[in-house]
Amino acid sequence: TAVRPTHRDYLAGLTERGQLQVSGPFADGEPGGALLVFVADDEAGARALIAGDPFVVEGLVAELTVREWTPVSGVLAQQF
């Protein structure tokens, strides 16, 4: 809870720079866990953005998965 404001400020900065498209916690009732969709040139670029997140810096992220995603259809597909 103490780090959350700094985390959200960090994500807001990424959003302003066009590097974060959307983020939010999972709604299944499990504590922790979120989905974040970044715009990066490659996996290393995405991991660099993640590494700066205060939740990661403070060791609050226990597990991390990075996967490339190719949007094909839907209302938002052209935004990516």
Image (tube, rainbow, N blue to C red):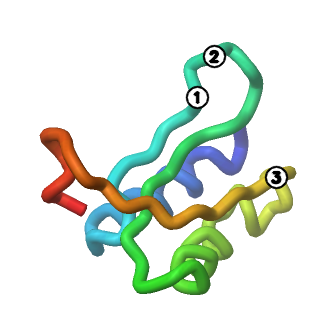
- Of marks 3 and 1, which one's residue comes earlier in the chain? 1
- Image position, residue 11 (x, y; %): 45, 59
Give the number of the disc on residue 28.
Answer: 2
Q: Is residue 68 left or right of residue 58?
A: left
Q: Please say if 10 is above or below 71.
A: below
Give the number of the disc on residue 26.
Answer: 1
- Element type at marker 1? loop
Quadrant housing residue 39? bottom left
Q: Please say if 70 is above or below 60.
A: below
Which quadrant of the rendered structure holds the C terminus?
bottom left
Q: Residue at x 73, y 33 (%)?
A: 32
Q: Is residue 36 left or right of residue 54?
A: left
Residue nearest the viewer, comparing 33 with 66: 66
- Residues at discs 3 and 1 in contact (Cβ within 8 Å): no
- Of marks 2 and 3, which one's residue comes earlier in the chain? 2
Which quadrant of the rendered structure holds the N terminus?
top right
Residue designated by label 3: 63
The residue under label 3 is which amino acid type? Glu
